[in-house]
């Protein structure tokens, strides 16, 4: 399957870029290769794919590249992707990749919670404690 996805990536298929990145990120059926995963996520993210932007944010966050993770969460959150909105709220709440701003954290959690994002709902409850 990875061979087919590689060909689709060569043809510019964004879904294939994201899927193959996920395989390399986890080592699922292919060699575990975080650098290749990051490159493929970037290719899809740079084409506006919100899932890739968010997953790239997760990967960068795991590598302690907090400012860059924050930037990719913002790209996806600005397009209304709830998982990124929640992640962005967490960044503002903890001051990771940006300054602490509980007002902005609440804003992003509320946006995601309005879409039914359970993590955002839990984070909102934590803010209110």
Image (cartoon, rainbow, N blue to C red):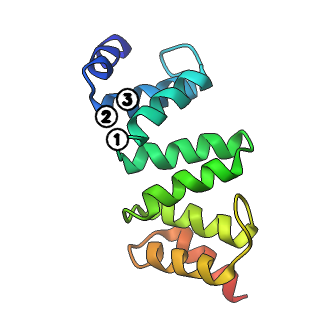
Residue 30 rendering spot, x and y as whole percentages: 50, 14
| Mark 3 in CB contact with mark 2 (< 8 angstroms) | yes
Distance from disc 3 to disc 2, alpha carbons, whole Å, reads 5 Å
* Residue placed under numbered mark 2 in the picture: 14
Q: Is 98 positioned to the left or the right of 40 in the image? A: right
Q: Looking at the image, is mark 1 or mark 2 earlier in the sequence? A: 2
* Residue 56, above or below 6: below
Residue 64 rendering spot, x and y as whole percentages: 75, 44
| Mark 3 in CB contact with mark 1 (< 8 angstroms) | yes
Numbered disc 2: secondary structure? helix
Numbered disc 3: secondary structure? helix
Quarter assignment of residue 32: top right
* Residue 90, above or below 121: above
**What residue sits 68% from the left and 81% below the top?**
102
| Mark 1 in CB contact with mark 2 (< 8 angstroms) | yes
* Residue placed under numbered mark 3 in the picture: 17
For the C terminus, the quadrant is bottom right
**What residue sits 60% from the left and 75% below the top?**
122
Answer few, some or many: residues within 10 Å of disc 1's Cα (few below 14, many 20 plus, some between 14 and 19): few
Labels 1, 2: front one: 1
Residue 118 rendering spot, x and y as whole percentages: 50, 70
Distance from disc 3 to disc 1, alpha carbons, whole Å, reads 10 Å
Q: Residue furthest top?
A: 3
Answer few, some or many: residues within 10 Å of disc 2's Cα (few below 14, many 20 plus, some between 14 and 19): many
Q: Nearer the viewer, residue 91 or 25?
A: 91
- Report the disc number at residue 47: 1
**What residue sits 69% from the left and 78% below the top?**
101
Numbered disc 1: secondary structure? loop
Labels 3, 1: front one: 1
Q: Nearer the viewer, residue 63 or 47?
A: 47
* Residue 54, above or below 121: above
């Amino acid at each position: 399957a990875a061979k087919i996805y590689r060909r689709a990536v060569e043809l510019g298929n964004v879904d294939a870029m994201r899927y193959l990145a996920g395989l390399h990120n986890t080592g699922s059926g292919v060699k575990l290769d975080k650098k290749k995963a990051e490159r493929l996520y970037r290719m899809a993210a740079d084409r506006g794919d919100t899932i890739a932007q968010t997953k790239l944010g997760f990967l960068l966050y795991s590598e302690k590249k907090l400012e860059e993770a924050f930037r990719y969460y913002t790209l996806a959150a600005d397009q209304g992707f709830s998982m990124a909105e929640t992640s962005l709220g967490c960044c503002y709440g903890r001051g990771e990749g940006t300054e602490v701003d509980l007002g902005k954290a609440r804003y992003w959690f509320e946006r995601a919670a309005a879409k039914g994002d359970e993590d955002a709902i839990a984070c909102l409850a934590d803010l209110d404690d």
